[in-house]
Image (cartoon, helix red, strand yellow):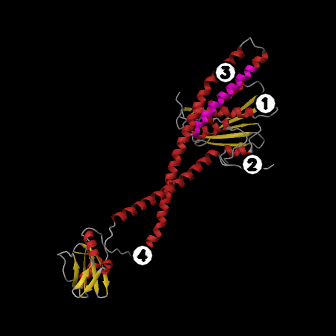
Amino acid sequence: MKKSVSKAHPIKLRILSYSVFTFAMIAWMTLTANLIIFFIIALHYQQYRPAYITGEEVMEELTQNEQGYVLSDRMQWQLEEKGQWAMLLDGEGKVIWSYAKPAELKDSYSMSDIARMSRWYLKDYPVYLRVYDDRIVVVGTPKLSMWKYNVSFPISWIEYCEHIWYWLLLFDFLWILVLAVIFTRRWSKSREAARIEWIAGISHDIRTPLAVALGYADTLVDGSLLSEEERQQAAVIRHQCLVMKELIEDLNLTSELESSMQALRKERFHPAAMLREVAAGFLDDAEEGTLEIEMDIDRQAEETVLFADRKLLVRALRNLFHNSLRHSEQAGAATVRISLQEEKRFCRIVFSDNGIGYSEEMLCRLNGRRRKQPVQNIRGLGIVCKSVQAHGGKITFGNGEAGGSYCEMRFQKSCCKIRN
């Protein structure tokens, strides 16, 4: 027979799928937002970038005759429309032609003046130069219309920028990952809150009809109008109602422990007295010869004090008893052994029985080594695990060498004594 391939837990798989989907969506949204911003900036640049006339265009419309240089009417109109001016310098820097040249500008320029205006400004006028043989065309634009500076960068800085973009990509990746984690945690919390609310609502709705059915079943069992067989049937109904009530309580408790919503009502008590109380209760309820309990409590452990939720630990011990009685297949009585030992800073409680033991799958699940869902139902034992872990204790399940199973629980002792 082929073994079925184990699959990841559906809830964990959904959370992982949601995380991957959220990461991909945030990455896509970030990339899209960057592209949109870049596109908007590019559109605004085209809007603010004026189409100024260049020296090449002026030179094409400038002709020379016997009287000097003449600029076409069309180019003159374009220069006036854009508020520009132009002039032509000879090889010695003298102005041999100009159009709309501001009066504050000179008619002759040295080589140093030409060098400065080629890089920056001329009397705060942004200018652009074009060299034709031994002539220089200078086209100016209005003041404060252009930001004109030559920018230079060292090669070492350019090489540094070539490497820094890796870190920028890493920063973007981490930023997207952080956002994905934040959204996933918020989604998980809201989903968990909705699940807990749904469980609480269903449990509340079931309690009323269950209480009615249990009340009628008690009346029928205690009544004298029914035959013995009918009273036995009513007893079965009452028992199943009690089982259903316990299932609802376990469901609520498991949900609260998983979400850390169970408020621990801690108090100081002697665990030895608690163990004897739970054991005595099961001996009183069990039929004669069906249950044997062996207690092994160290003399020092008698005075050990725990600071914990006593009712929650009693519930955990009762679940261990129920599990042992439910899965006892011995011919004689079911035997339960409970030992309490004191260590340096901890007290150790070992609960063992002579039952059929745990399967390998169940041990892996109970000890947290595998997430595969076993065949057996571990609802009650799951509450035991979560109850111990809620107190910061450690728990281990296993099978005995001579048969049966055991559960070892370790709790930190309280440093204070109980006041009489």
User: Are the residues at dot 1 and dot 2 in contact (C-beta closer than 8 Å)?
Assistant: no
The alpha-carbon separation of the residues under discs 1 and 2 comes to 37 Å
Q: How many marks?
A: 4
The alpha-carbon separation of the residues under discs 4 and 3 comes to 85 Å
Q: In the image, which residues are magenta? A: 233-258
Q: Which callout, 4 or 1, points at the residue further toward the start of the chain? A: 4
Q: Which callout, 1 or 2, points at the residue further toward the start of the chain? A: 2
Which label sits on residue 4? 2
Of badges 1 and 2, nearer the viewer stands 2
Query: What residue do we see at 67% from left, 25% from top?
Result: 242
Q: Amino acid at mark 2?
A: Ser
Where is mark 4, residue-wise? 156
Give the structural element (helix, strand or loop) at label 3: helix
Give the structural element (helix, strand or loop) at label 4: helix
Which quarter of the picture shows residue 321? top right
Give the structural element (helix, strand or loop) at label 1: loop
Q: Residue 188 lies in magenta, yes or no? A: no
Where is mark 1, residue-wise? 333
Asked if residue 276 can be seen in this view, the reply is no
The alpha-carbon separation of the residues under discs 4 and 1 comes to 86 Å
Where is mark 3, residue-wise? 213
Give whichever of 255, 294 is nearer the camera: 255
Q: Is residue 167 left or right of residue 49?
A: right
User: Are the residues at dot 2 and dot 3 in contact (C-beta closer than 8 Å)?
Assistant: no
User: Are the residues at dot 4 and dot 3 in contact (C-beta closer than 8 Å)?
Assistant: no
Q: Residue 257 lies in magenta, yes or no? A: yes
Q: Which callout, 1 or 3, points at the residue further toward the start of the chain? A: 3
Q: Which residue is at the far left? A: 103
Of badges 4 and 1, nearer the viewer stands 4
Q: Position of residue 209 (x, y in %)?
A: 63, 23
